[in-house]
Image (tube, rainbow, N blue to C red):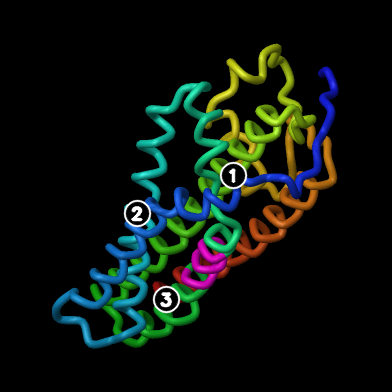
């Protein structure tokens, strides 16, 4: 792969404008989730309302992301990388929110499910499992989009890209979001990389943070499974 001269990473004027352009999916999903959590009838448990609101917002966010990815072309990915990469505070807040509510489903919902018993226990157990699944999916899909935008931002600014995909001759024209989903979900499921090579310190730090978060989520899923089995037997 040909090395490109790398300008300073601090000289990124698009990132400041991106704070106003990158929020629609996040804000739409958050608004819908809050409305559902507040307005849902017949629930007087704030914890349960919060989890249902989070699940709704997470599902909307996933749907919006997947719709964007399905319509994307390599050219539109490059344009979006310059204009839309998630502002850092929004990205980190989303990750923290997903982790918090994923664990909250275990710590807050499962004890109540055990006390209730019967169909109520089954319903709350399924809700907890759904919360973990949605949170896990939001984290790794959002990382995939973030990786894609970071990668193409580097290419458009003639930086040496931080990932090397084997068998790809034309990085600008061959890669799509699903390639980055492959990389992201491998990290998410195994807390390690596979055949895609990480080439720069900046990317190693991102992947390290992703791997640590993945380990915590996998531990949470294991905890949920144990709680589910303990509740039924």
User: Dot 1, crowdedness within 10 Å: few (<14), some or many (≥20)?
Assistant: some
Q: Quadrant of the C terminus?
A: bottom left
Q: x, y (%) of residue 179?
A: 58, 29
Q: Earlier in the sequence, mark 2 or mark 1?
A: 1
Q: Earlier in the sequence, mark 3 or mark 1?
A: 1
Q: Please tell me which residue is depicted at 27% across the width and 74% down the height of the picture.
A: 37
Report the predominant secondary structure element of the magenta stretch. Answer: helix
Residue 216 showing in the rendered view: yes
In the displayed structure image, the side of residue 173 where residue 31 appears, left or right: left
Q: Please tell me which residue is depicted at 15% across the width and 81% down the height of the picture.
A: 42
Q: CA distance from mark 2 to mark 1?
A: 29 Å
Q: CA distance from mark 3 to mark 2?
A: 27 Å
User: Dot 3, crowdedness within 10 Å: few (<14), some or many (≥20)?
Assistant: some
Between circles 3 and 1, the one closer to the viewer is 1
Q: x, y (%) of residue 171?
A: 66, 20
Q: Quadrant of the N terminus?
A: top right
Quadrant position of residue 192: top right
Q: Is residue 98 magenta?
A: yes
Residue indicated by mark 2: 59
Q: CA distance from mark 3 to mark 1?
A: 51 Å
Q: Which mark is residue 14?
A: 1
Secondary structure state at the residue bearing disc 3: helix
Vertical placement of residue 193 versus 17, above or below:
above
Between circles 3 and 2, the one closer to the viewer is 2
Q: Earlier in the sequence, mark 3 or mark 2?
A: 2
Residue indicated by mark 3: 231
Q: Which residues are magenta?
A: 93-101
Q: Viewer-proximal residue, 161 or 117?
A: 161
In the displayed structure image, the side of residue 52 where residue 200 appears, left or right: right
């Amino acid at each position: 792969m040909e090395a490109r001269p790398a300008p300073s990473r601090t000289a990124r004027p698009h990132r400041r404008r991106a704070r106003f352009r990158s929020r629609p999916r996040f804000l739409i999903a958050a608004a819908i989730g809050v409305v559902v959590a507040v307005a849902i009838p017949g629930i007087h448990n704030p914890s349960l309302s919060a989890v249902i609101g989070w699940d709704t917002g997470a599902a909307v966010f996933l749907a919006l992301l997947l719709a964007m990815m399905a319509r994307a072309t390599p050219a539109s990915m490059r344009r979006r990388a310059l204009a839309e990469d998630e502002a850092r505070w929004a990205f980190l807040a989303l990750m923290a929110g997903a982790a918090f509510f994923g664990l909250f489903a275990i710590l807050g919902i499962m004890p109540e499910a055990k006390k209730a018993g019967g169909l109520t226990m089954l319903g709350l157990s399924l809700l907890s499992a759904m919360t973990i699944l949605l949170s896990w999916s939001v984290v790794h899909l959002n990382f995939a989009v973030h990786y894609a935008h970071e990668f193409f931002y580097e290419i458009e600014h003639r930086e040496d890209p931080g990932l090397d995909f084997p068998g790809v001759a034309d990085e600008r024209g061959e890669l799509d979001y699903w390639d980055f989903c492959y990389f992201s979900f491998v990290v998410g499921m195994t807390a390690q990389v596979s055949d895609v090579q990480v080439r720069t310190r900046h990317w190693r730090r991102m992947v390290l943070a992703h791997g640590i978060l993945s380990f915590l989520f996998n531990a949470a899923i294991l905890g949920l499974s144990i709680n589910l089995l303990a509740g039924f037997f």
